Amino acid sequence: MQEKILILDFGSQYTQLIARRVRELNVYCEIHPYNHFPKPDSTVRGVILSGSPWSVRDEKAPFPDLAGIKGLIPLLGVCYGAQYLTHMYGGEVLPSNTREYGRAKLVSADPADPLFAGVTPGSQVWMSHGDTIVRIPENYVITGSTGDVSVAAFRIRGEQTWGIQFHPEVYHTTEGSTILGNFVKGICGCPGNWTPESFVEMTVRSLREQIGDDRVVLGLSGGVDSSVAAILLDRAIGDRLTSIFVDNGLLRKNEYEAVLDAYRRMGLNVLGVNASAEFVEELSGVNDPETKRKIIGRIFIEVFDREAHKVQNVKWLAQGTIYPDVIESVSVNGPSATIKSHHNVGGLPEKMHLKVVEPLRLLFKDEVRRVGRALDMPAEILDRHPFPGPGLAIRIVGEVTPAKLEILRDADEIFISGLRRSGYYNKVWQAAVILLPVQSVGVMGDERTYENAVVLRAVTSTDGMTADWSHLPHEFLAEISNQIINRVRGVNRVVYDISSKPPSTIEWE
């Protein structure tokens, strides 16, 4: 069994970041809500308590029962977690005189404490809390302080329990990885052997046991998640996996043929289905983005179900679910408010009465790519930018028509080809062209034009949860703009989107 660290989530915006930092140390970890966490078994080597938007003094603050953890296995409380360990066991936590947010210096850190082994005196840490620990219980020992916070870190005598009021997981805590490494590897004794290669070996073995001699169908999208899931399943069960790649008429220019060819060169048993006319016809006259998503989802289910029934004796449906989707479904406060329907199409398991297998449900997005590299996947698939399930339908603001799709495909091809040619493609996390329902006056030669405007969108990100606009050179943008206006009939204006997420989203719809 895989040894692991449990993270108890109190609703912090940084909880997933803790998990990512621990996994970067090649140590497997899982996030569980504080009010729904499993009883630690022999595979759990330690527990981390996350931060929280709550104050421990709030009546409805998270108050978990740590009876089966504290004093029995290594425990690290971060921010709220540290304040909880103080408040619940005889110490005092009060509102800070000044709200403690931002950079601070760890002016003292006990070098004999295993949590701070190798940490430089005066190391920068990141504070983010409105309360502070003013008095610790009798059996607690202060192990670290900043200029403004006398109890920045502590440990409990006679226990492997620590608390820190700063966030080791964020970039601005310069030696945060050292501190987390000291906890998960030094104190908890995790060997750090959870690598992409070990994940592949473990997952292939597990898939064989789970599926047995049954047959599986998988919907391929051309994206990284479904492609990596397909390769893992192919290694486990070979031709008993049938992958279905549906052309919904909303893909990029020549994408259906290129991706289908790549899958076949990878040796996958893949069935290509051209259903573009069905999708585009159903979208006629529809302007609302959420309605567009629902129509695309419904038709995909119908097409996939129809094609999957041509495969005999199928018992399983494979999906490219990744770990953030799993966490979201069991979050502290339940699933978060819907901003828009998820790009991945749901509803298939219920309609098809199949058992579900999810090879990637333990991985974050960047981990999926690392596993893909371990599987020697071709760069043309592995390094592709994320592409939304509804495709170009949500990059056309308003009604989707064949004429608009042609304009958008041509403009998109110029932008993406330019990124590849100039070397910027792999420096950008995601890029798109958006066709606006806006026409503007222009002049071409001696003629006045009244044509469409398009938006170029390029962002940098790690997993899409947050994103910053890419600072592409003005010369490059000028070149792309000139090419689009000169070569794409129907466009006379190009603009560049410099909005970050939040507050904006990456896609426009």
Image (cartoon, grey):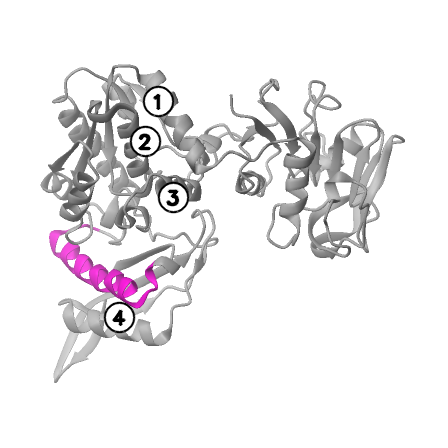
Res 231 seen here: yes
Residue at (76% x, 44% y) in the render: 131
Side of 125 where 194 appears, left or right: left
x, y percentage for residue 464? 42, 48
x, y percentage for residue 182? 68, 40
From which residue to which does the magenta span run? 399-425
Amino acid type at mark 1: Leu
Side of 137 where 213 appears, left or right: left
Judge depth for marks 1 and 4 and give the one in front: 1
Give how far apart the Cα atoms at labels 2 and 3 are.
Answer: 13 Å
Whichever of callouts 1 and 3 sits on the residue coming sooner in the sequence is: 1
Which residue position holds label 2? Answer: 232
- State if disc 3 and disc 1 touch (CB < 8 Å): no
Q: Residues within 10 Å of mark 2 (few under 14, many from 20)?
A: many
Which residue position holds label 1? Answer: 207
Which residue position holds label 3? Answer: 369
Q: Secondary structure at mark 3?
A: helix
Return the residue nearer the eye: 365 or 130.
Answer: 365
